[in-house]
Structure formats: structure tokens, C-alpha cells
Image (tube, rainbow, N blue to C red):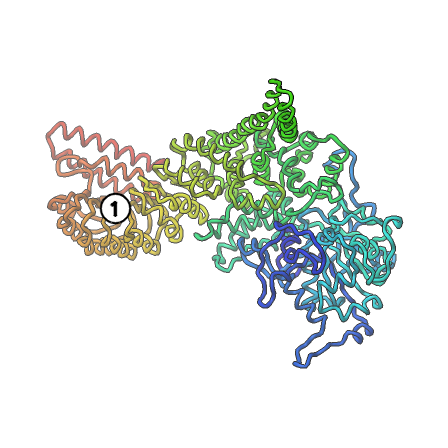
Amino acid sequence: MQCHCSVLRLGVFRRRNYFLQEKCLRGLRTVIRPHRCQQYVCPSGLSKDTYRSDRPMFLLSKSPGFLYSFTSLRSQSGSVTDPIEQHRHRLSAWFSCLPTEERHFGPSFALDSIHVDPVIRECSPEDIPRPLLELNLQAQLQSPLCSQSMSVSQLFLPDTTGKSVRNVVLYGTVGTGKSTLIRKLVLDWCHGRNSEFQLIIPLSCEDLSQVTAPVSLTRLITKKYLHLRELLPSLQHYSGVLFILNSLEWMNLDFRMANTELCSDPNDPMPPAALLVNLIRGYLLPEANVLVTTRPSALKRIPGKYVGRYAEICGFSDMELQKMYFQLRLGHKDADPRETENLASMLSRNLEHHSQLSAACFLPSYCWLTCATLHLLYYTKPDDSRTTLTGIYTTFLRLNFAGEVLDITHPSKISLMLYVARTVGKLAYEGCKSRRTKFSEADITKCFHVQMNSEEELNLLTVFRSDAFRFFLTPCVQPGQESLFVFAIPAMQEYLAALYVVLGENKTALQRLGKELSEIISKAGEDVVAVVNVLSKFLPLRIFTLFNLLRVVPRLYGRVSGQSRDNIAQTMTAEMFREEDSYNDDVLDQINSSILGVEGPLQPAEDDSYSSLEAFELFPIFMAGLLSRHNRAMLDQLGCTIMNMDALKITRALKKHLLRCSLRRLPPSELMDFLFFLYEFQNPDFTAGLVTSLRDLDLSTVRMTPLKCNVVATVIGGSGKLMTDANLSSCHLDPDALHTLAPVLRRCQNVNLHMNSLGPDSCQEIKDLLLHPDCSISYLRLCNNPLAPEGAKLIAEGLAGNSSLKHLSLLRTDLGDEGAEILAYNLGKNKHLQEINLAYNGIHDQAALKLGEEASRHPTLSRVHLYFNELSDSGLRALQTMGDVRVIVSLSEGADASRHWSLILRELKANAGGWDQERMGSHLTLLLRDLQSSRALTGNLWRKARILRVETEVKLMLSRIHQGKL
């Protein structure tokens, strides 16, 4: 096991990312699938057409003769033209380029400098997994297949008997990091860190499988790397050549001599498969070494006698490797280092306590998915509106499965991902429908054998079981449940269930039969009707007209199948608005908890009924996301096509169902889920039609992360809808969140930002909000935020230029006398304010009187709240006699109870949760004393009764404070 100072992209970016730029070998006729081409960041001076690094390589060892023959050549201009050095530079450029997805989801790391090696274990031929006749999954997944651990540099060392090793087969299931490991090996050679080899010439088995014309090895290399043409004539005379044949599963090799002729001349043209057979046999370049990478299902295509060593790449079997990866990968140039450290430590603790997550991160691919999800949750920016959770999962699968065929030898050439959607997707859907996350071997057998009608289908299942089963399902690690299986990442179950439904695979046997019959009748009907039309001219029999009914059958089936699209929409709506899930945490917090864990005391162990209580709230959200145009394009690359007309019909039916359900008032977390649902859909017209039904935005107590703020701003802000209320109290807002939400907030009449720990730095955003020409806010609540005098100055500046605000609450915002005087000085600049609440701000008599005097001169201000401040009895009396403005300072007014006593107590109850209980108790005691004094002064029985009622309410509040229940 080798650990470099470096980050791995093991298995995740696979060949279609590092290796996918040049899809054809120059001069060769190659079949190119456009969807396999990716975008890359190309170094200057190199075109995108030169980018392809999935091709195996020659690695030439040092030898005096070799170095003597291939001396450097210099042109007349003096530039170095050494073919080996040129090749180093070009391969370094090809293998260093990063896929677009890496730039979207986080920082870009140079693989040649940041890398964590996975575990590689040497296996004996007896340890190689063999196809099983029955689905004994538990034995297959849990049996130890490897014994001795080794590093990449040890692959070609002599074996235990001292015999030299010529050919090495490096195999691993999907996502273990085969291609990334080869990529790292090549980059090490390019930068001089691998002194054993000198030259690399990539070849790709995937590309070679598309070549139909015979080609010689020399021609193959020359057309790809023209600068190596000087080396090729002498290549066969030197030892130490290493071919790395990547993705051998794309080639159907036949080692029988009757079918593949022998060849020892690199200049003889042959079919590509024959070239590889002769190369592995040792007839072609017998001194060369060969390193083959493949999936387990293709291991038997090379006879064991031609393999010197089998090595399995086992991923991150050591938890410390997982932690090392996460620590390096979560670093972000724009992120707060403290936040990054906190995320890494929480993730590390969860890996230690949540063994199921650690088991999932055994595959480096899932380590990447975990980090990509965390980047979405914590580092989303306002301009990242196209990055969605569904998009991350779809991209993740595309990076691992795009263009992959389950079995190249099978006539159907079925897409690996389509096979997954039909089999694993069915299992996932059945689990969502029955609210289960754990599956027995019988459950898996039932779903996988649903269409097992032939030997070919059984062979496909065998290939899938050996190559990709462990990518999706893993044994449960909970004690006593080791015989059950769970999805490696819980959200993957909901994603595959959504894919299964959206693809229309959720059909009964009768529906499948009807579709097949409709297609047959549709094809045959046209020919029959044409013949009948000819016969009817010679034999005018009326019965011939009945054959025209054949044309009706496809239309009739089309209408029937249209009902299935309506069923998909109905399923999405029903799952979206399940009453039993209404008061759960929102789905984004659920995802966050599943990755980082829940800080605090451990929850009690759940009983056996726990699985029936599972919430699958991502299921409908993934269905919506899969219907977006961007994700449908990526699914098409995976071989899972959703037709545009089908998506349109589902969307129309969905809008009808959602309009009925979205009219009811939703709990905050459920409303957040609904907005996230619309965000994932990525359809502005569809979203605008549904947002019009929302009157209020109540997201109180929802933890508003950058992603959630972006979701709200994109869904509601983009529609331009005017709303009545926006309740964002206790949402953990910060200045960045306010900036993101500004387009939404300024179009709301009542905005509640109560208890968000907003400091003076946030007041600049509030000022900008008030000064915006489109500001429609009439009631702004900033209670229980430490705004301080600095914040009061900014708010006063905002008030001066605002004409919409009528009510402003600054209750308990730490203004003090300085803040009150600042507001008093600037109060006259605003001509529209009607009410201002400055209660519980530590204001003394002088500042309060100055504020009261300015308020009495204000043309529209009619009410000022100054209770729970540090006011003397004389100050209270002076404020109660202020001109036309009513200053609310106490529960009593002279010998009577204040007409606003219920308002004061209601404000106290609403805000008591975040207040100093002892201080509030002392203030209530003073108010109670004032009430008792007022009651003693009056002889009016009606007033005494009213004051007694208020006293009773105050005593009840004091009692609850002493008991800690308020």
C-alpha cells in the first residue's frame, strides 16, 4: 500500500474522463458515439483532439543499447526534438486534464502531485471469483478473495519462486479506481518519479474494439504518435517494453490458434484482437511486458498460463485512507478553513461510529460522491443554479457507466446502466413502496430473476453480479443483520427507484404484452391495409373495411399507455405530500445527517419496526430531477432514454396534480422540500405556474444553508411573485444568506428575520434591501439579533431612503443609548414609518426622551415601544405624556391597565426563548409592582378587575420562568 502526498480520483473519473478526448485513432476507421465525448480544460497550445489517455502504454526500461540508439535530435533552430521527451510532455498534458464535473463540484487537484493509493492485493488463480450457478450473493461478497497487499511498483517483481513476471492482470469491480491508478502511474513516469521506464504509448481496448480494418502495431502507434516514428523500427530488438491494455472487457479475444493466426512482425497488419492475442502470448515483441486492466467478468478471456500475476484493486479498505482522502478533498480555496476542518472532523467521527458509511466508502467512487454532495450542501454559490443533487448522482453514474456495455459478447449489447435500472431499480422501487432499506437474498433473487427466460439472460446476470453488484449493494454491518443487504449509499436507492419509475419500467406483465402486440400490429398493419386496398378495387366486399381497424390499435394503445404517464405524475405527487413525512427534517438536512452524522447523545436503538418508518422523501424529488432536460441528456449517454414527448406528458399531468396539493398550507420543512422539488425540476415555466399558488413563505426554524438560500432565490425570486409574508425566524441566516435571498425578501410585505444572530455586518444587506427601488416591505421584524449601534446606523440610513416600510421591530437588538440616539437623529428623514419597537435594548431616560421627542414630531409615527428598558419612574411618566405619539413603556398607565398590555405580553411570550430568564423575571417583577400600585390608586371596580387580570397573567409568566418552562 502506497500513500503519496496526493488526492485520488480513483475509479470515479474513469476512462471516459481522463481518457475520452480523442475517440478515434488517427487514420483508423472508428465508430464514435458522440455522447461519450466530454469537455476538458486543455493546456494552451494543445487542441482538444489530442486528449485521450485511456490507451495502454509501452514503457521501455533503461538499457545501454536503447539509450545509445535513441539519442536526442536537435533541429537547426536548436529546439529539443528528443522523441521520448516530447512524448513525456504530451502524455503529461493528456493525462493531467480534468473533466468538467471536477471543476463544478470542487477544487481541482493535480493527480501527479496529490494522490492516495488504493489497496492492491495479489491473488492466486484459485482466488479469482468464478461464475456461480446460483445467486449465492452473501458468499460471493464476503469471502476473502485476496491475500497479499502490494504497491504498483511491485507488480512486475519476480514471483515467490523467483520467476520473472511478463504479464500482469489488474482487475477490479466498477468504481475501485483501475483507470485512475494507471493514470497516476503514467504521470509519475512523465515527471521522472518512475525511473524504471522511459516511454509510454497509450492504447485503448474500447477504441480498438471499434476498429474493423486490419492494422499493424507499428502503423497503430505511428498514426497516433508521429513523433515516435524514429523509435519504432528498433523497438522489437529491445527488452523492457510494457503495454498497458486498459479495459480489456471491450475486446473478445480468442486464443485458439485455429481462429487467431500467429504474428511476430509488428509491421504485419492484423485485426486488433489478433494483435493483442499475439502480444499477450509473447509472439509479438516477446521481450515486452503487458499490464492489463479489466473487470472480473473478462478475466477468463486470457488463459491463466499467459498471466504471471493477478492483482485485485480493492479500493479504500483502510478507514485511514478514507479519512486522508476526505481531509484533502474537502479543502476549497474559497472556503473558511475552520469550516472545512469542522466538516472533515464531523465526517471522520461519523466514519468511526457509522460503519455502514465506512463500508460504502470502501469504493473510492463513493468517496467522491460523498465529497461532491458536501460541496453542494456547503459551498453552493448564487450562480450555481444548474448544479442539482439529481445532476450530481446522474453525473456520478455517467462517470462510471457512460457507454459501458454489460457484456460485449452478448448479441443485445445492452447498456450496463439500463440493466441496472431494470433490475436494481426494481429492487429499489419495491423497497421504497414498502418503506424498507434492507433486503434479503430472496428479495434480490425475486427482482433479478423476473425476466430470466433464457441462457443469455442468465449469463448477463452472472456478468453483472461479478462486475457491478458490489457497486450498488453491500452486506448490512449491523449486528444480527449480516445476512441482509443495503444500498451502499441510502440516497442511491431512491435515485434508482425514481429512474425505474420515470423510464416506465414499472409495468405489469399485461402492459408489457400489450406494448409488444401493439408494435407488432403497427408494423404488420400497414402492409395488410395496403394489400386490402388493392384487393378491394377488384373484389368490392364490405368486409375489407374491417381491416382498417388495424390502424386504430396503435392509437388505442397510445391512449392506454398515456394513463401510465399520468400514474407516474400521480406517484410523484403522492410521495411528495405524504402526511406521515410532513414534520420530518427537510431532505437536505437528512442528507447532511446521513453523511456527517448527528452531533449529540446517541439515539436509542430502534426496534424491528424501524424499517417500516423510513422516510423516502428524496424519491419524488429525484423523479422530478430526472425529467429535467440536462439530466435526460446525460441519461441518454447511459443508454436510459426518456423521450421528449413522454417527459412533456408527465410534466403536464404533474402540474395538474401539484396545483391541487400545493394550495394547502405546508409545514416549514415540507415547504422547503417542495421548493427543492421545483428546483431539481429545472423548468422555469413549470415552476412559475406553481409558485403563483404560494401566498406565504414560512420557513421558520429551517436551517438555511447556502444551498437552501439558493433554492429559494431561484424558485421564488426567479418568478417575480409578490408574497404577503416571509417568515425566516430562527433560520441561522448570515450576510451571504441575506444577499442571496434579497430578490425574494424585497417582494414580500411582511418579513420576519427574528432570532438569526444577525450582527452589524448583516445590516449592510438590510440597508441595501430597504434602499432597493423595488422594495415592497411594509413590516420588518429584526428582533433578537445583536445589531448593536453600528447596525442601527446602517438601518437608519436605509430608513432614510425607504418609502414602503411602515412597521419596524428592533426588540432586543443590543442598541443601547448610542443606537437609540442614532435612530432618533435620523428618524425625521423618513416620512412613512408608523410604528417602531425598541423594547429590551438597555435604553436609559435621556436617550429614550430624545427618541420620544423626535417621534412626536414625526408626521406618521404613532407608536413607539420602549418597555423592558432601563427607565426610571420619572422617565416612564415623561414618556407616557408625549404629544400625539403613543410611547408604550409599561403594562399600566396611571391608575389603569395599559390598553396595550396584551400586545406587550404577547411579544414577551413570542421572544422569551432567547432571552436572559433572570433579567426578564426582574423586569416582570417591576411591571407587577407598577400594576399593584395602579390598582391601589383607583377606586373603579372595573379598572381594578382589569388590572387584576393583567396581574394574573404576569404572575403566571413569572411562575413559568422560575420553573424553566417559558
User: Which residue, given by chain and number where applicable, does mark 1 sit on?
Assistant: 808
Residue 444: x and y in percent read 68, 32
Residue 129: x and y in percent read 78, 43
Is 540 located above or below residue 496 in the figure?
Answer: above
Q: Nearer the viewer, residue 930 or 683?
A: 683
* Residue located at (48% from left, 59% from top): 334
Q: Nearer the viewer, residue 270 or 369?
A: 270
Q: If the image is split into quadrants, where does the C terminus sit? A: top left
Side of 583 relative to 300 (left or right): left
Q: Which amino acid is tagged 1?
A: Leu
Residue that protrudes farthest toward the top in the picture = 542
Asked which quadrant contains residue 291, the reply is bottom right
Specify few, some or many for label 1: CA neighbours under 10 Å numbering under 14, 14-19, or 20 or more: many
Residue 903: x and y in percent read 24, 37
* Residue located at (77% from left, 70% from top): 231
* Residue located at (69% from left, 43% from top): 468
Q: Is residue 120 in view? A: no
Residue 798: x and y in percent read 26, 54
Q: Is residue 269 in view? A: yes
